[in-house]
Image: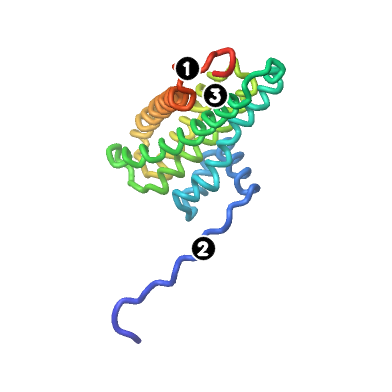
């Protein structure tokens, strides 16, 4: 026996992320969200790990799809400025990554106002894993004229995933979950539009990117 408080043993390190785990999570959250939210709810992780081990990877779908679309559409045959295309791909990646991540911080700030349990890691889980729909929907950028479907399909289904996950991850009462999810969808769309406009104006230093190029 020893007097005084007992120092708990250090927490075991988090297991390394793997591509198979990421793919499994993405498929499961899209196809069986209720069950997968319960699995995610019990997982030990961190905000940094959620962003670095999941978000930064899936956010690559958007610029890759756009690059494929550029080749399919024959953009390079018309001698489009390669430097401009690279900047455009960078902007699209930033928009793709930052929108769900920023949403996670906003969800965390709103949680207590809607009767949920404030937890920054759980809020980021909710935003990042719901963002799976947003990132997968970015495949539509292969067909640049349909870029608006990225927002409609990605945020639409992502909003459904949020609605399902709110009571599980943040303990939001069932009667308030639709209100919370609706507000989150609105914020998500506004963030997308704001980031898009900032990207065009700051990086390209022009009012907008010509529709004939992309978006």
**Residue shown at 44%/26% (left/top)?**
202
Q: Earlier in the sequence, mark 3 or mark 2?
A: 2
| Mark 1 secondary-structure assignment | loop
Q: Estimate the x, y position of residue 149 in percent, counting from the top left.
A: 55, 20
Numbered circles on residues, count = 3
Which quadrant of the figure has residue 115?
top left
Disc 3: which residue? 150
| Mark 3 secondary-structure assignment | helix
- Using the image, tell me which numbered label, if any, was put on residue 24: none
**Residue count near mark 1 (Cα–Cα under 10 Å), binned few <14, some 14–19, many ≥20:** some
Establish if 79 lies above or below 170.
above
Disc 2: which residue? 13
Look at the numbered discs 3 and 2 and tell me whether their residues touch, using CB distance below 8 Å: no
**Residue shown at 36%/48% (left/top)?**
119
In space, the residues marked 3 and 2 are separated at their CA atoms by 37 Å
**Residue count near mark 3 (Cα–Cα under 10 Å), binned few <14, some 14–19, many ≥20:** many
Disc 1: which residue? 208
**Residue count near mark 2 (Cα–Cα under 10 Å), binned few <14, some 14–19, many ≥20:** few
Q: Estimate the x, y position of residue 144 in percent, counting from the top left.
A: 60, 19
Q: Earlier in the sequence, mark 1 or mark 3?
A: 3
């Amino acid at each position: 026996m020893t007097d005084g408080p007992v120092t708990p043993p250090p927490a075991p390190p988090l297991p390394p992320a793997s591509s198979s785990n990421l793919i499994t999570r993405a498929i499961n959250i899209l196809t069986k969200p209720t069950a997968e939210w319960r699995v995610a709810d019990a997982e030990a992780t961190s905000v940094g790990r959620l962003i670095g081990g999941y978000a930064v990877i899936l956010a690559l779908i958007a610029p890759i799809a756009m690059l494929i679309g550029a080749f399919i559409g024959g953009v390079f045959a018309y001698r489009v400025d390669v430097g401009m295309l690279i900047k455009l791909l960078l902007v699209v990646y930033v928009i793709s990554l930052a929108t769900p991540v920023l949403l996670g911080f906003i969800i965390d700030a709103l949680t207590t106002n809607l009767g949920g349990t404030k937890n920054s890691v759980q809020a980021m889980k909710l935003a990042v894993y719901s963002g799976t729909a947003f990132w997968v929907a970015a495949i539509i950028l292969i067909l640049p004229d349909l870029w608006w479907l990225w927002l409609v399909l990605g945020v639409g289904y992502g909003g459904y995933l949020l609605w399902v996950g709110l009571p599980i991850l943040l303990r939001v009462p069932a009667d308030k979950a639709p209100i919370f999810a609706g507000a989150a969808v609105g914020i998500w769309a506004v963030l997308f539009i704001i980031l898009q406009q900032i990207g065009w104006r700051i990086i390209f230093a022009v009012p907008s990117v010509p529709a004939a190029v992309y978006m």
